[in-house]
Image: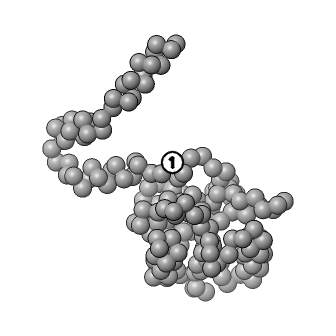
Amino acid sequence: NTAALNSCLRKISDYELAEDIAKLKGRCPSLTEKMIDESLSLEDKSEWMMCEYEKSNYKEEEKKHITSRGLKVRSKSELLIVEKLYEYKIDFRYEQVVHIGKSTVVPDFTIRREDGKIIYWEHEGLTSLDTYIKWQRNKADLYASIGIVPWDNYIVTYDNLEGNIDLRIVESEIKNKILL
């Protein structure tokens, strides 16, 4: 129905967020500008981040750690990295599948910088397991085969042998390779 669609389009194009915010403030006077701004920034994520993408469904039951925004991740270290990405308002996708020839890899985070450049981030948590380290080396070789390399568009962080992460390193990577 063309008439109905045109009517809907007119209503959408006339929509004013400011009017709804004013109504909300009238109904709830305790709302501060800061609360409203923070709420809007959570809702106003980039189209890229909100688009559907091919997600890994590998061992979904192992995603037991829940971020402050409800994302389920595999480890406490990943949870801490995600919280830093949130803190710095960085758009990312968790466990987006990347096809490389006949192989498939799943970086922990695929990040889109403000300039549009894509950065891949792996966090290696099981540093005490030789088989895990070998798999990570093979994965790094696959990435390198298509130009995903540490000095350009690839971040790798590690847990130490006791299984702990150093958030100073995470922040350094964010500031020096993502925010620039």
* Rendered location of residue 155, percent (x, y): 60, 75
Whether residue 34 is situated above or below residue 2 in the rendered picture: below
* Relative side of 36 to 116, left or right: left
Residue visible at 18% across and 37% down?
Answer: 27
* Relative side of 122 to 100, left or right: left
Q: Residue furthest right?
A: 102
User: Circle 1 is placed at which residue position?
Assistant: 47
Residue visible at 26% across and 53% down?
Answer: 35
Residue type, numbered disc 1: Glu
Residue visible at 57% across and 64% down?
Answer: 117
> Which element type, helix, strand or loop, lies under badge 1?
helix
* Relative side of 12 to 132, left or right: left
Q: Which of 53 and 177 lies nearest the eye of the viewer?
A: 177
Residue visible at 63% across and 60% down?
Answer: 95
* Rendered location of residue 67, percent (x, y): 47, 60
Q: Residue furthest front?
A: 115
Q: Is residue 89 visible?
A: yes
* Rendered location of residue 131, percent (x, y): 77, 78
Q: Which of 4 and 132 lies nearest the eye of the viewer?
A: 4
* Rendered location of residue 86, percent (x, y): 43, 63
